[in-house]
Image (cartoon, rainbow, N blue to C red):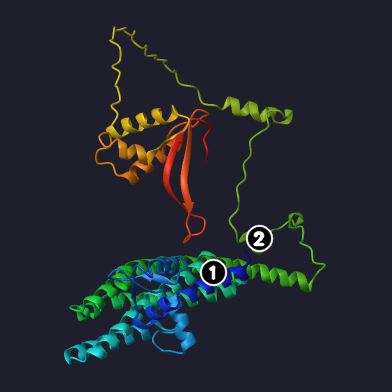
Amino acid sequence: MSNKTNVRLILERLHQSSDIIAEAFDSSRIGATEENSKRITLLIQQRILTPDIYDTFQLRYSMRQFLNAVLNTNKLMDSSTDFSISFNRLDEYVNRHNDAFLESRDEDRQNYQIYIRDLINGIAGSIADELLHISSLVDSKFATVTTIAEKMKENEWYMNRATSILNLLETFSFSDIEQRLMGHRDLELSYDLLLKSRMIQFIETFRLILSKLDKYKYEFRKIEAQAKLLRKFSTHLNRYPDWTANDWSSNEELLDWMCVANPIQLSFYPDINDSSFEKLLVDIALNLPASKTISIYTRKRPFGILLDMDDAPVVKKEFSALEKAVNVFMNLATSTKEGMSARDWWINNPSMLNKVTEEYWVHRILSERINRKIGPEVRIDLVFKESKDFEGNVKVSDIVVSQGYANV
């Protein structure tokens, strides 16, 4: 399927569920009913809706941000802006909401509740997107730039960016917004579910990113020092293409710059196959220290004693009532050519299947395709029909076991 067909398919599904998307955008959330439950499930699979409190659903942050940009609204903050603006706006709307509540302005209070929920969702989504963006750059060691100087600039900029966001999150975690939202159940649940529960993860992830960036800073500095020497040498070779290194081993006296480094002491081992090292090997052998007298002590193992033992006890496995029922059903089903239905056998044998539901019994018989070695004497067929709501899925209604080869 081409990309063009995929886009057309998504747009068709969005058009079919336009009323759900519009209601979720205008009312900030939508509840599932018998009429729209299937379409809501499809929208969740398309990453258009996301679960909210009270068994309701809301638009994902990216979808709501797209609609706000198209409609030219100012409900949410813009992407990649300063997070402090959004936190200040959240603090301001909480104050306005509490004032409207004390003054019994119900309509204004409901509007402020929608703004506050949108802001909480937008802040959490923006922080998650920022973490994903910075993490991808850090893990690739800023692969988008090539030179060390550019990598150092990128590293320093994102260190400042991550530090400022981390300080802001740590400061916000000690704010009194949670106390000011107490008593307003919807706002309190939205704050706890969408932002507060994820705040610890956000802070720890930013700390991990800062530790990686700090490590990269020193690695880039080491590489930069070596790169400067290489650039100088490269410039020298470009200016003097005929330059060759001097043979300093022929000098009788060492120059001053040769004496800066500590001397390296070299040692070697004589080759035992070379006759020229015979005298050296003899001197080494004569100077070997005398070996000390070593007393060899061996401890003998005592003789073993054979004891008469009774036969090892055999533990017999006790089968459960469900396992016995499965064995009886499989033996009866494989003895007939017409086959036997798992659901019919469950209905006709309630005494052997005490407290076992019909759905669990069908799943249990279905697992016999894996537990048993299906051979030419056993055949397991599935009675199913294709699902109209989900492409590629089927609904299994029954299982028939009979003689013959396995029908997968």
Left or right of 97: which side holds 323? right
Residue 147, image quadrant: bottom right
Residue 32, image quadrant: bottom left
Depth check: give the residue in front, 119 or 387: 387
Left or right of 95: which side holds 141? right
The N terminus - image quarter: bottom right
**Residue sitting at 44 percent across and 85 percent down?**
68
The label on residue 72 is: none
Amino acid type at mark 2: Met
Depth check: give the residue in front, 136 or 354: 354
Where residue 309 sits: x, y (%)? Answer: 28, 9
Depth check: give the residue in front, 163 or 105: 105
Please name which of the two marks, 1 or 2, marks the residue nearer to the observer: 1
Residue 193, image quadrant: bottom left
Q: Earlier in the sequence, mark 1 or mark 2?
A: 1
Give me the C-alpha separation between circle 1 and circle 2: 27 Å
Disc 1 target residue: 221
User: Which residue is at the far right?
Assistant: 242
Q: Secondary structure at mark 2?
A: helix
Disc 2 target residue: 258
Where residue 55 sits: x, y (%)? Answer: 30, 68
Where residue 202 sits: x, y (%)? Answer: 37, 69
Q: Secondary structure at mark 1?
A: helix
**Residue sitting at 37 percent across and 14 percent down?**
299
Is residue 160 visible to us here?
no
Amino acid type at mark 1: Arg
Q: Is residue 387 above or below residue 280?
A: below
Mark 2 closeness class: few <14, some 14–19, many ≥20 residues within 10 Å: few
